[in-house]
Amino acid sequence: MMAMVHNADSYEAGGAGDAPSEPAAPIFSRFLFVDVAAQRAKQLRRGALPRLERPATPAAGPRKLERVAMEEVRQGAIHYMLPPTPDAALRGEAA
């Protein structure tokens, strides 16, 4: 199962596709957490802007994008969608 992470670059200012202002629901599954954080790290490597402010202290130094992605997911700054399961499709449930 692969979660779909909403890219920060896909949101246009003032449009209907604005980033949600409320934090995302916490992720309790470590497997889902890793999946969402890995996809977000990929977005960051491709040039997406981080959604969290970094501390202004010089001791903070450069951080790996994977760590930035994990912190974004941990703080609820990343919204994601799960694909519908095959069982839901068989029961006729809407996604």
Image: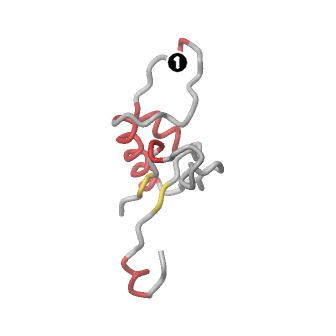
Question: In this rendering, is residue 21 above or below 70?
Answer: below
- Residue appearing at x 52%, y 38% in the figure: 71
Q: Position of residue 11 (x, y in %)?
A: 50, 47
Is 7 positioned to the left or the right of 20 in the image? left
Q: How many marks?
A: 1
**SS label for mark 1:** helix
Q: Position of residue 88 (x, y in %)?
A: 43, 80
- Image quarter for residue 75? top right
Question: In this rendering, is residue 77 above or below 16?
Answer: above
- Residue appearing at x 54%, y 56% in the figure: 28
- Residue appearing at x 44%, y 20% in the figure: 62
Question: Mark 1 = which residue?
Answer: 60
Q: Residue furthest front?
A: 14
For the residue carrying disc 1, how many other residues have a C-alpha within 10 Å: few (<14), some (14-19), or many (20+)?
Answer: few
Q: Residue furthest right?
A: 22
Question: In this rendering, is residue 5 above or below 69?
Answer: below
Q: Position of residue 79 (x, y in %)?
A: 52, 52
Pick whichever, 50 or 71, lies toward us. 50
Question: In this rendering, is residue 5 above or below 9?
Answer: below
